[in-house]
Image (cartoon, rainbow, N blue to C red):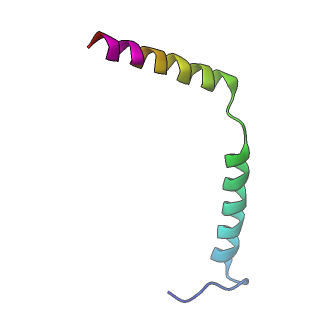
Amino acid sequence: MPPKTAGDPNAQIATKLRAFYHSVQEEALPQRFLDLLEKLDAVENGVRRAE
């Protein structure tokens, strides 16, 4: 596959997608989601203790 050039629309899309994904990656998780993960961990740990 030939290298992409700056004028290549696919290269431009890829650059914009990388920037978007990076910005999403930097966002904090909502507290509700963190609370849910803690509850799931607690349930999972309770199941392991019961075994």
- Does residue 17 sit above or below 7 in this rendering? above
> Residue at point 72% right, 36% down?
28
Point out residue 47 in the picture as x, y percentages from the top left corner.
Answer: 34, 14
Point out residue 2 in the picture as x, y percentages from the top left corner.
Answer: 54, 89
Quarter of image, res 19: bottom right
Single out the residue that lies furthest toward the bottom. Answer: 2
Point out residue 9 in the picture as x, y percentages from the top left corner.
Answer: 67, 77
Single out the residue that lies furthest toward the left. Answer: 51
Q: Which residues are magenta?
A: 45-49
> Residue at point 55% right, 20% down?
38
27 to the left or right of 50: right
Quarter of image, res 6: bottom right
Task: Tell me if residue 26 is in the magenta stretch.
Answer: no
Point out residue 16 in the picture as x, y percentages from the top left corner.
Answer: 72, 64
> Residue at point 70% right, 73% down?
12
Q: Quadrant of the C terminus?
A: top left
Q: Main secondary structure of the magenta part?
A: helix
Is residue 32 or residue 39 the one in the foreground?
39
- Does residue 26 sit above or below 44 in this rendering? below
